[in-house]
Image (tube, coloured by chain):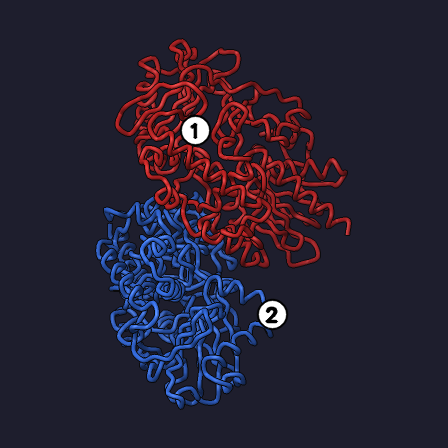
Chain colours: A red, B blue
């Protein structure tokens, strides 16, 4: 572990100047830094928190089970994170999906089924029709400039909720679609526009790529946790990564850019800001950012998600022929459950995702109430053995002081057509923008974060060459 | 003029402690301070800019004509601003609306008509039906808790654009409604939810109260400008108002609250933050604000408006029997034009409002292009005499470093139901919230700002009594 990553010990003073400063040591910032380092451009990464990885955070429970508090999966078309895994020797293993899945409905029924998507059961036809329509519309969106689509203004004027109300007749299909939106965006369908949904689907290669497990976004997990490639990249970057250095102000009025951190000042020729949009908006820029960029940031709001890991001595549900995968269309806090057990089967781990409105209701309860509520749901799904876990670990992302939500920020209705062209990620003089929210491909994912850092690094390299 | 309002001269140092600190010297902050002062509670108002009034700013042009860069009107049910006008002896005069009004349509036609609202002409029936429907729905919204309405979730899930698409068949009626939304909220119908529109209408006493001139929100103007009551209040508060003291951080972790300004630190028992939501979000709070409040602020985005004053030797349009009032439903930058001449007729002043998408298009042009574009529109409406003004003055509010938009911030779809109850204005420990965006009545107006300050002061007084 390089000195800069050590939780204790004194830190060397910040250099007075550096060619390129990167703000944020999530995957986007590390990717930008790695790209520049690979081209022998000196770089300094300033991270506010005491760790790298941002929304990706792998930890061991008290009993030693490795869990991912944040992003955890990798899919086969996520080529850039797979390239990192290759480069740093981080092995993956398939997500467990053997056995029957469960669906819990709002009327209290629990249905057991097999296979990857909804079959002929309640609402499945309407769901399939709607997702086919979404895929068809998404093909008309150019991911490099979503607002340029012929129907962009209409699509950005309507919430996804309204789109479903208008085009999907079957209430159960609408319930399926609402959970799909919660699962993919960690937001309610009322909070994002149809255009943003279409852009996001287009950048992932289709709705099924976002939703499915096998050969899609939920395909595999990392043996050493999804943070392990980030830790390896930080290790490679060494003392160039400075933790506990939150950037509070960026003055870009002069020849070079002046960054004010709580640990001192740095001057840089170029800056890549790779923090989530609300964190970027909280930096004091002098002069203020151009209106379109400021508005884009103001209209980009983090989703709301919590991950709850419940650890058992063994994955007992597998003995009942269950996969551990469940979708909950009712009032439960959990929206989706997965088997998150380690690959060696040394423990049985269920992970429950709590999204949007569910999270707001659930987090009104105290520690005991939240735990009881969650175990009640798991017991209903997987039987009495679920009631007494060995460990119970929550990560409520809206409460995270550095990230403030999850998985990503999504622009509110109207933001793409009003501010996207100039505000999404166009550089402002010496300031360049990274972060998964600026990616055309796999926006909102680790892969998109890495791509965004590489793109920002290319911009900087091109501008330094001039 | 008290010392604190003097643009030059040295400022006395900030006191070490004060019972109540108010952040922001717009109408809301001044109102809070005045209410506390009236109860003999010592107060300190910290304002970032070099003037009081916030979004209200009265100035003389180079030739001496008084204009209002920002909010300018007062209506007969705006009792609190009228009470200030009475208290400080600020006289008003009726908005000029004598003569025929003009409507410019997207097809190039210009129609001349008389009266307060649309008559039997194109789209008028559909407009009247829609506004009647809005008034009917608005009566079901309790302004103290809009999210409690039975249909709140559905209403907050749909943009106003979608509501019009769904319920208004006539395209010309939809054009009228779109301009009405732009005129009232300085936003496009796609940017706000139906619930927010209904809340706002309910708090104003009906759609006509927002739209009409006589006996409604546009009824009268101030002889000495709409800033004059604010200047008088600041004069009354004297050295308690400190200009050029932007509050950068608020630490509320201890017994008292520590405010860090660029001019030093102050400790206060209670703090009333009375800045626009995006400015509030830019303050570094330690600890961070509760999730609901943080999300509410993040989802509250300023509207986009510019005001353009065009000054002529005399109000020549009156000689043609024109009122100077025009509505533009096409592609012109101007959306609405009013006769803003001084009451003595010493000059002829037209004011043009540029909103939302129009503002984004128009502000891509340089100074000369913007002016030429505006004068071309006015010439088309009022004849060749409009082409050669004596003076031309723009105020583009999104570019204002302290306010960053106008008229007010409005929550994005979904924000009311998800975060309204806990995030709208509920105090957070010793922190209280003012600003027109927190008002139940005349939200977005000067009157709402004053009411919000009075309400926050009542909260503080009650909490200090305990």
- Estimate the x, y position of residue A254 in percent, counting from the top left: 67, 58
Question: Residue at image x 68%, y 26%?
Answer: A87
**Residue B226 as seen in the image, left or right of residue B108:** left
Question: Residue at image x 26%, y 28%?
Answer: A107
**Residue B61 as seen in the image, left or right of residue B269:** right
- Report if residue B91 is visible in the image: no
Residue B224: which quarter of the image?
bottom left
Question: Residue at image x 51%, y 73%?
Answer: B394
Height in image: B398 above or below B6?
above
Q: Secondary structure at mark 1?
A: strand
- Estimate the x, y position of residue A12 in percent, counting from the top left: 67, 37
For residue A99, the mark is none
Within 10 angstroms of label 2, few (less than 14), some, or many (20 or more) residues?
Answer: few
Q: Which residue is mark 2?
A: B366
- Report if residue B81 is visible in the image: yes
**Residue B129 as seen in the image, left or right of residue A259:** left
Between B199 and B256, the one lying in front of the other is: B199
Cα gap from disc 2 to disc 1, whole angstroms:
50 Å
Dot 2 and dot 1 within a common chain: no
Height in image: A195 above or below A220?
below
Height in image: A308 above or below B294?
above
> The numbered mark 2 sits on a residue in which chain?
B
Q: Secondary structure at mark 2?
A: loop
Q: Assign the N terminus of chain B to one quadrant of the image.
A: bottom left
For residue A307, the mark is 1
Height in image: B360 above or below B85?
above
Between A135 and A272, the one lying in front of the other is: A135
Instruction: Please say if the residues under marks 2 and 1 sit with CB atoms less than 8 Å apart.
Output: no
Residue A183: which quarter of the image?
top left
> The numbered mark 1 sits on a residue in which chain?
A
């Amino acid at each position: 572990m390089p000195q800069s990553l050590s939780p204790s010990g004194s830190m060397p003073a910040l250099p007075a100047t550096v060619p390129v400063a990167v703000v944020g040591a999530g995957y986007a910032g590390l990717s930008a830094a790695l790209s520049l380092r690979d081209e022998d451009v000196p770089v300094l990464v300033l991270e506010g928190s005491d760790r790298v990885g941002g929304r990706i955070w792998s930890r061991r429970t008290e009993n030693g089970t490795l869990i991912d508090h944040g992003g955890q999966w990798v899919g086969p078309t996520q080529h850039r994170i797979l390239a990192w895994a290759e480069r740093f020797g981080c092995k993956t293993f398939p997500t467990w999906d053997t056995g029957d899945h469960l669906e819990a409905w709002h009327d209290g029924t629990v249905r057991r089924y097999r296979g990857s998507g909804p079959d002929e059961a309640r609402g499945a036809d309407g769901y399939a029709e709607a997702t086919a329509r979404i895929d068809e519309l998404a093909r008309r969106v150019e991911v490099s400039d979503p607002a340029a689509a012929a129907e962009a203004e209409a699509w950005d004027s309507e919430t996804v909720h309204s789109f479903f109300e208008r085009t999907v007749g079957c209430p159960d299909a609408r319930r399926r679609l609402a959970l799909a939106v919660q699962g993919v965006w960690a937001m309610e369908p009322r909070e994002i526009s149809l255009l943003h949904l279409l852009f996001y689907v287009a950048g992932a290669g289709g709705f099924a790529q976002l939703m499915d497990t096998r050969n899609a976004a939920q395909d595999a997990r990392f043996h050493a946790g999804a943070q392990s490639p980030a830790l390896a990249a930080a290790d490679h970057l060494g003392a160039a990564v400075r933790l506990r250095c939150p950037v509070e102000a960026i003055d870009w009025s002069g020849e070079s850019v002046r960054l004010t951190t709580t640990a001192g000042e740095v001057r840089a020729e170029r800056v890549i800001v790779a923090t989530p949009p609300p964190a970027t908006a909280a930096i004091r820029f002098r002069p203020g950012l151009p209106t379109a960029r400021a508005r884009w940031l103001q209209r980009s709001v983090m989703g709301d998600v919590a991950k709850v890991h419940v650890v058992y001595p063994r994955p007992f549900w597998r003995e009942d022929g269950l996969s551990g995968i469940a979708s909950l269309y009712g009032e439960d806090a959990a929206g989706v459950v997965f088997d998150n057990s380690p690959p060696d089967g040394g423990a049985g781990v269920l992970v429950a995702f709590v999204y949007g409105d569910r999270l707001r209701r659930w987090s009104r309860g105290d520690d005991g109430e939240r735990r009881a509520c969650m175990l009640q749901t798991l017991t209903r799904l997987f039987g009495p053995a679920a009631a007494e876990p060995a460990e119970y670990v929550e990560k409520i992302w809206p409460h995270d002081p550095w990230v403030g939500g999850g998985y990503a920020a999504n622009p509110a209705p109207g933001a793409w057509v009003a501010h996207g062209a100039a505000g999404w990620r166009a550089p402002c003089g010496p300031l360049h923008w990274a972060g998964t929210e600026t990616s055309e491909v796999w926006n909102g994912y680790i892969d998109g974060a890495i791509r965004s850092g590489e793109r920002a690094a290319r911009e900087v390299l091109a501008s330094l060459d001039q």
